[in-house]
Image (spheres, rainbow, N blue to C red):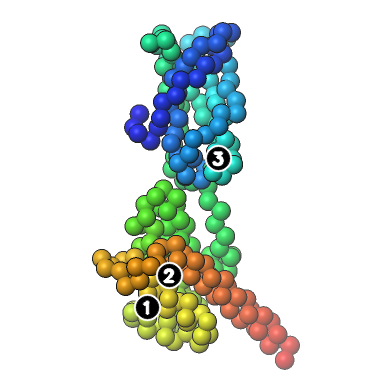
């Protein structure tokens, strides 16, 4: 086991008697990704009736950061009583996708599936503490969002131009300002020197989140206008 885990000896009920076992416990919560010391809510007993299957025990943990519970299963390795405790092996545990609450309006997901995909991947990267990928991913997601929005307004738009040129064509001044500020912070994430050292990728995310709300609103307004114009 790598240093992603810590070892902890806990007594469990093994074949009807209390017996210490050594468990590998992940350092990071599989639900929120934050490193924490988890409370143990429950340990199962370990006994089996059917021969030739491994002996298992389960533990329910509570994360102090997100407050959620998770269950891990352990195989108790046969005849492994060692230095006063039994060895165990963590069964099928993968800390791959952290469950994030990602709220992107449906019309934005539909407008730019590429934006949505990269935005989600960026938040996953952040949850796994890949901070460089997080900022660069957000920068890329922004580019898809703006370009796909322009194409939805006019499919003939030439999008093979620098992002700033497109942003300068945005009519809504609030959206233009947000997009410009996002693009500037995004460049900081993609380049080796920072122009805005007091800002970071979290500030970029905050700008992009407001931008999503505004563009989603513009799409809804366009939908309403088209409906109203049918009766005029
Ligand atoms: Zn957690």
**Is residue 47 depicted above or below 108 in this figure?**
above
The answer to which of marks 1 and 3 sits earlier in the sequence is: 3
- Image-based side of 91 in relation to 221, left or right: left
Quarter where residue 164 is shown: bottom left
Q: Position of residue 79 (x, y in %)?
A: 41, 8
Residue labelled with disc 3: 64
Which mark is drawn over residue 224?
A: none
CA distance for labels 2 and 3: 34 Å
**Of residues 20 and 110, which is closer to you in this image?**
20
Residue labelled with disc 2: 142
Q: Can residue 72 be seen in the rendering of this structure?
A: yes
Q: Residue at x 48, y 62 (%)?
A: 116
Ligand 1 lies under 8 Å from the Cβ of mark 3:
yes
Q: In front: mark 1 or mark 3?
A: 3
Q: Position of residue 143 (x, y in %)?
A: 40, 71
Q: Residue at x 38, y 10 (%)?
A: 83
CA distance for labels 1 and 3: 42 Å
Residue labelled with disc 1: 163
* Local secondary structure at mark 3: loop
Q: Position of residue 28 (x, y in %)?
A: 45, 39
**Residue sticking out furthest to the front:** 198
**Is residue 75 depicted above or below 208 in this figure?**
above
* Local secondary structure at mark 2: helix
Contact between labelled residues 2 and 1, with CB atoms less than 8 Å apart: yes
């Amino acid at each position: 086991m790598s240093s992603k885990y810590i070892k902890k000896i806990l007594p469990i009920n093994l074949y009807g008697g209390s017996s210490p076992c050594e468990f590998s416990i992940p350092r990071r919560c599989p639900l929120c990704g934050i490193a924490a010391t988890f409370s143990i809510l429950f340990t199962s007993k370990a006994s089996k009736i059917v021969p030739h299957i491994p002996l298992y025990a389960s533990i329910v943990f509570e994360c102090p950061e997100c407050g959620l519970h998770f269950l891990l299963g352990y195989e108790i390795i046969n005849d492994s009583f060692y230095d006063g405790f039994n060895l165990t092996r963590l069964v099928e545990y993968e800390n791959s996708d952290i469950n994030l609450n990602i709220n992107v309006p449906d019309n934005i997901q539909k407008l730019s599936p590429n934006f949505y995909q990269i935005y989600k991947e960026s938040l996953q990267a952040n949850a796994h503490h890949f901070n460089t990928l997080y900022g660069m991913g957000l920068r890329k997601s922004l580019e898809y969002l703006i370009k796909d929005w322009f194409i939805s307004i006019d499919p003939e738009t030439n999008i093979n131009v620098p992002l700033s040129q497109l942003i300068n064509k945005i009519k809504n001044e609030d959206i233009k300002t947000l997009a410009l500020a996002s693009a500037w912070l995004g460049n900081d994430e993609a380049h080796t020197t920072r122009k805005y050292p007091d800002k970071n990728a979290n500030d970029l995310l905050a700008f992009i989140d407001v931008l999503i709300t505004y563009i989603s609103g513009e799409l809804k307004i366009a939908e309403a206008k088209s409906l109203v114009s049918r009766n005029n």
